[in-house]
Each structure stands twice: as C-alpha cells, then as structure tokens.
C-alpha cells in the first residue's frame, strides 16, 4: 500500500489552499506527495446558499493565495484574467464579488488538482499504525457511494472538514422531518416546499437575513417569520480598526495570550463574525418591514426577543411554542417549514480521530495548528478551521487561510526534509556495511 506524505480529509477552501501552498513550496528534491479525500461527488462550496443576490463579506484579496504569495497563479485576480473578466470586474468598483463568482473561482482552482483528490468518498475512521512501540503511520479508511471501503496510509494528516450544522436541542427529534432543515441545505430543501404558505426562520445572522430576503422576494412568496432571541439584529462591524483582529499578525498575538485573555478577546469581538449580517442587508430588511406597515398588509414578521420553547410535528405542519421574552407570554404558531439558520459547531474532528485519542490527549494545538501528541506518536495532524479558541475568530474564515496553509506547508516541508535526510543517512550506512 502506498504511503502518502500527507492525506487531507476534506477538500474545501482550506485544504485546497493547502494543496496550492504545497505545490508552490515544492522543493527541488523529493516533493511532498499529497492526497485529498472529499465526500462530495465534486467540488462544491456552500452550494445550497448560492443565492442570487448574495456576495462575499471579505475582500477578494483574501483568496486562496494572495496574502501568502501575491505572484501566485492561483489568485482571484489571475482567475479573472484567465476568464477574460478582469477589466469588467475593475469597473464594478468593489472588493466583494458575488458568492456565485467566488465559488466559480474556487472550483477553477480545485479543477487543477483533480488528479490528487478522491471525490465521493467519506472518511469514516483514522487508525494508528504502529512500528514497534511507536505510531509511525495513520491508516485512513473511507467509504464510497457504492459502500466500498478504501484504505490509505499517511505520514501526516490535514483535517479540513468544516463545521457541522448546529441543531438546537428542541429540533433534534425532527432531524428526519423534511419540513425542518438547516440553512446549509436551504436551496435544495426549499425547492421541495413549493406549497408552503408560512415559513419560520430561526436565527439572527447573515444566513438568516439572506434567507429572509430570498423568501420574501419569490413569486407567490410565503408568509415569513424571522424568530430570534436578541432584541435587535446587529450589523457586523467591519470598520478598519476592528477588522485588525482578522489580520495575520493578530493570530500570533492571540496565541501568545493566556486562556482567560483569549476567551475575553473572543467575547469582545464575537459580533464581528456571529449573528452579524451586513448593514446593507439589515437596511433592506427594515425597508421591507416599513413598507409593509404603510400598506397595512402583514406578510412578514420580525419576532424579536422570542424563544422557541417546544416543537411538535403534526400532519398539518410544524407547531412552535414561542415565549415572548418581553411580555412573558407563550403562543403556538403552525408553520409549513422551519429553516434553522443556527450556525455550526467545530468539534467533528474529535469523533473522526477518536481511535487516536490516547495519543492526542485534550486535542490541543501548537502555533502551527498541529495537534500535540505523546512522544510515541510520530505523525503530524493539522487542524484547519477548528482552532478558534487558540488562534482567534479569523480561524473559521477565509481571512487567514492562505497564510495558515503556508505555515502548515512549511511545517510539513521541515518534517519531510528531516525524514529524507535520515533516510539518506541510513542508506549510506547500509552502503558502507556492504
């Protein structure tokens, strides 16, 4: 069985950027041989949130390569050049392309690595492979769409599997009910709700706001309730000084702080990334609600300071019991569908790496995103997008992705060079003995 220097689990933007960094850091000697495994049948990035009017919330300069290597052929600017749209994009006078165009850029980059990515396989287990008393390699087991299991060996792993949909406890019993679904599946699932007359959206962030705008703008639009615990929908603060927390050098500062100070920093700036839609989007929503008051027709509602106390599925719909936190009064409302714009959790890697837990302890990471293992554990396991508590709020975003993958690539190159040198010395030793 071939031993890969690196297996990347997941092939979204993070591991795609890592593939680019490795390609561009390719040494003159033996290259780092990498393989990636992706459960989707082809490259896709938030495909069920490709709404017509949705645009990026970060600058196109924070693409897969620019902050690490502005001369890279994998920059968004070079993508525009190759697609013969660079001049027209300049004339748009924006730093924020549509989400659809940025997805096309990511797909364009991913297509250049088709030969090292196994699509349509879901990694189900990572096992330790021992040599004597040490764990020398990792056995990665994946299953394809036909149920066939594949096994590969790796010296190192990069986990880039993204977040798992966060489902509030009261909705978990209905996870198999097609009328209740997470925003990550929005476009695919809403297409199956053609007869829905009343829809609830749970959440107060960018996804909730985008889905609200999409639903109210559809022909024959349903009645829509946006339900949130907060008193108001607060826009994201993207002012220059606040945005410095997403700078690359802030990662060093964040990692150098004690745990208590890190937690305080995340709490202070939490609303720059969570439950914080664009100001323009908030203004559009307010205008719709105001014009509705002028017309006297109530088709959409903004239920602030409301908490979902219980959920009941019935033949005629999904019944939500809501507590008005201001009036301390409960009411039950029937909906044909409920969209959960409730964010993501970032703990999936722990279950996936469960068999390695005896060697990885508390799953803490070093500055280069590498899990800290026991002395007898030789592989390096890197986490992408799961280190927010130690590396800052930018960790789950594209903001530092190109630089982070450059750091991981450098760590891999260092280990690769050391191993190659050791192998050459061993080879010379054998030759002398002969």
Image (cartoon, rainbow, N blue to C red):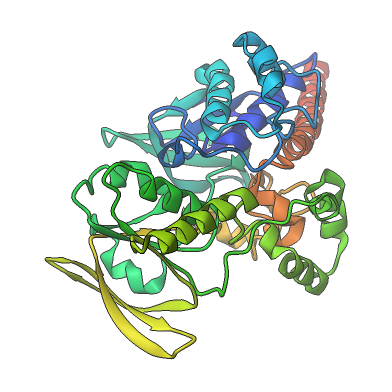
**Image quadrant in which you'd find residue 182:** bottom left
List x then y, in percent, for residue 230: 55, 73
For the point 50% across and 74% down, which residue is it?
A: 229
For the point 82% across and 58% down, which residue is it?
A: 255
290 and 198: which one is in front? Answer: 290
In the picture provided, is 411 more to the left or to the right than 293? right
In the picture provided, is 71 more to the left or to the right than 307? right
Relative to 280, does residue 16 appear above or below in the rendering? above
Q: Is residue 5 visible?
A: no
In the picture provided, is 283 more to the left or to the right than 127? right
Q: Is residue 386 visible?
A: yes
The mark total stands at 0
Relative to 434, does residue 264 appear above or below in the rendering? below
List x then y, in percent, for residue 85: 62, 13
List x then y, in percent, for residue 102: 58, 29
List x then y, in percent, for residue 19: 64, 27
In the picture provided, is 325 more to the left or to the right than 377? left
**Image quadrant in which you'd find residue 201:** bottom left
Q: Quadrant of the C terminus?
A: top right
For the point 45% across and 89% down, which residue is it?
A: 327
């Amino acid at each position: 069985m071939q031993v890969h220097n690196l297996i990347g689990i997941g092939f979204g933007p993070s591991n795609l950027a890592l593939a680019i960094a490795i390609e561009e850091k390719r040494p003159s000697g033996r290259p780092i041989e990498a393989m990636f495994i992706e459960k989707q049948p082809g490259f896709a990035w938030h495909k069920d949130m490709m709404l017509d009017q949705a645009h990026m919330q970060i600058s196109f300069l924070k693409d897969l390569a620019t902050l690490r290597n502005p001369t890279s052929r994998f920059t968004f600017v070079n993508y525009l050049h190759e697609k013969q749209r660079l001049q027209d994009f300049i004339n748009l006078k924006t730093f924020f392309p549509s989400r659809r165009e940025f997805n096309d850029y990511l797909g364009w980059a991913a297509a250049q690595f088709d030969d090292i990515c196994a699509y349509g396989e879901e990694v189900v287990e990572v096992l330790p492979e021992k040599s004597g008393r040490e764990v020398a390699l990792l056995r990665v087991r994946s299953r394809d769409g036909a149920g066939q299991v594949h096994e590969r060996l790796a010296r190192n792993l990069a986990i880039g599997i993204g977040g798992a949909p966060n489902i509030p406890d009261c909705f978990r019993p209905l996870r198999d009910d097609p009328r209740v679904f997470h925003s990550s599946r929005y476009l695919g699932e809403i297409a199956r709700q053609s007869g829905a007359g009343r829809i609830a959206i749970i959440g107060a962030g960018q996804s909730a706001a985008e889905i609200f705008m999409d639903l109210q703008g559809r022909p024959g639009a349903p009645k829509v309730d946006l339900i949130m615990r907060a008193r108001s929908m607060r826009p994201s603060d993207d002012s220059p000084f606040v945005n410095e927390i997403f700078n690359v050098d802030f990662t060093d500062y964040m990692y150098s702080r004690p745990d208590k100070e890190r937690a305080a920093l995340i709490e202070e700036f939490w609303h720059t990334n969570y439950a914080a839609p664009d100001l323009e989007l908030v203004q559009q929503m307010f205008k719709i609600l105001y014009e509705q008051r002028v017309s006297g027709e109530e088709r959409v509602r903004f239920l602030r300071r409301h908490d979902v106390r219980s959920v009941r599925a019935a033949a005629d719909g999904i019944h939500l019991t809501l507590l008005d936190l201001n009036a301390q009064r409960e009411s039950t409302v029937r909906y044909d569908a409920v969209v959960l714009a409730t964010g993501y959790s970032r703990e999936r890697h722990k279950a996936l790496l469960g068999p390695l837990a005896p060697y990885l302890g508390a799953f803490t990471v070093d500055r280069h995103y590498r899990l800290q293992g026991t002395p007898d554990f030789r592989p390096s396991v890197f986490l992408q997008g799961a280190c927010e508590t130690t590396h800052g709020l930018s960790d789950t975003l594209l903001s530092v992705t190109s630089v982070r993958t450059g750091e991981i690539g450098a760590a891999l190159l260092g280990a690769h060079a050391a191993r190659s040198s050791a192998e050459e010395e061993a080879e010379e030793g054998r030759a002398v003995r002969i």
